[in-house]
Amino acid sequence: MILGGFCTQACTYCNVEHGRPNPIDLAEPGRVAEAVRALELDYVVVTSVNRDDLADGGAREFAKTITATRSLSPHCQIETLIPDFAGKSESLNIVLEAQPDVLNHNLETVSRLYPYTRPGGNYVRALKVLEHASQHKPKLTTKSGLMVGLGESWDELLDALQDLRRVECDILTVGQYLRPSMAHLQVSRYYHPNEFEALKSIALEMGFGHVESGPLVRSSYHAHEQSNAFATATSVTERQDSHDS
């Protein structure tokens, strides 16, 4: 996680500290790149807190981190789990031009619950992040995640899945919300494993390229395997389409 440990937003489900962030650490991209090289990673997920105090939302630091990592570990795949940059397409473009392998932005929950769970966020804006990424870089793999157990209905969940497919989201993660502390939003209910399997089947039928759905699934859960599975499925589909034509 880059850009410090203090988030400028206060989502009611999140255990990241919120408050006034520290100044940007200009040496951080280089340190991340050195760590990736030292650990000999094949895949890395770079994420951050929200930095609404910065004009670009921290987009340049994402880009610098991607570039620095690629220079030292050219074979390492890079997934960026980004904030919404307050809806600024110019900030998002800075990240996209650095060419991450996967662009991840979590929808998190259904539209109705945004005012209670993500008061600093916006449901439509979150979808537009993914839509813009797909349109600006059509070959880029896009990814998003949902938590269940926040008070949503089944139909609302299906609507959210449909919304993600409308913006051509490729990879989906679905996991159970677990309350970080008594000060956070209560768990509305715990989903049965069969319900997670049902959501996975429905999502795949909708056209998602790869789906991870289970109680302990999180946004970066088996991220490398997700990316590889999607790439393999896409390659097979392209070969079948080529053969059929």
Image: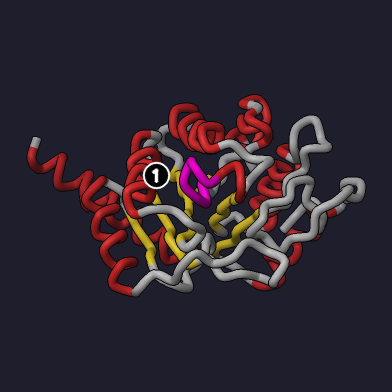
Q: Give the colouring mode of the picture.
A: secondary structure
Q: Which residue is mark 1?
A: 160
Q: Total of numbered circles in the picture?
A: 1
Where residue 65 sits in the image (x, y, percent)?
A: 72, 49
- Write the start and end of the magenta stretch as one range: 107-113
Residue for point 39% across, 60% down: 228
Where residue 201 sits in the image (x, y, percent)?
A: 24, 59
- Is residue 104 shown to the viewer in this render? no
**Left/right of residue 107 with respect to residue 19 in the rendered view:** left
Residue 168 versus residue 4 in the image, above or below: above
Residue for point 15% across, 41% down: 241
Where residue 70 sits in the image (x, y, percent)?
A: 64, 51
Please state which amino acid type lies under the numbered disc 1. Ala
**Left/right of residue 157 with respect to residue 130 in the rendered view:** left
Q: Residue furthest left?
A: 244
Work out whether residue 95 or residue 123 is closer to the camera in this orientation and state it: 123
**Helix or strand or loop: what does disc 1 sit on?**
helix
Q: Quadrant of the C terminus?
A: top left
Where residue 118 sits in the image (x, y, percent)?
A: 63, 46
Residue 119 appears in which quarter of the rendering?
top right
- Is residue 96 shown to the viewer in this render? yes
Counting other residues with Cα less than 10 Å from the Cα at mark 1, is it few (<14), some (14-19), or many (20 or more)?
many
Q: Quadrant of the N terminus?
A: bottom right
Residue for point 19% across, 47% down: 239
Q: Residue furthest right?
A: 23
Residue for point 51% across, 31% down: 128
Query: Quick check: is 187 in the magenta stretch?
Result: no
Query: Quick check: is 108 in the magenta stretch?
Result: yes
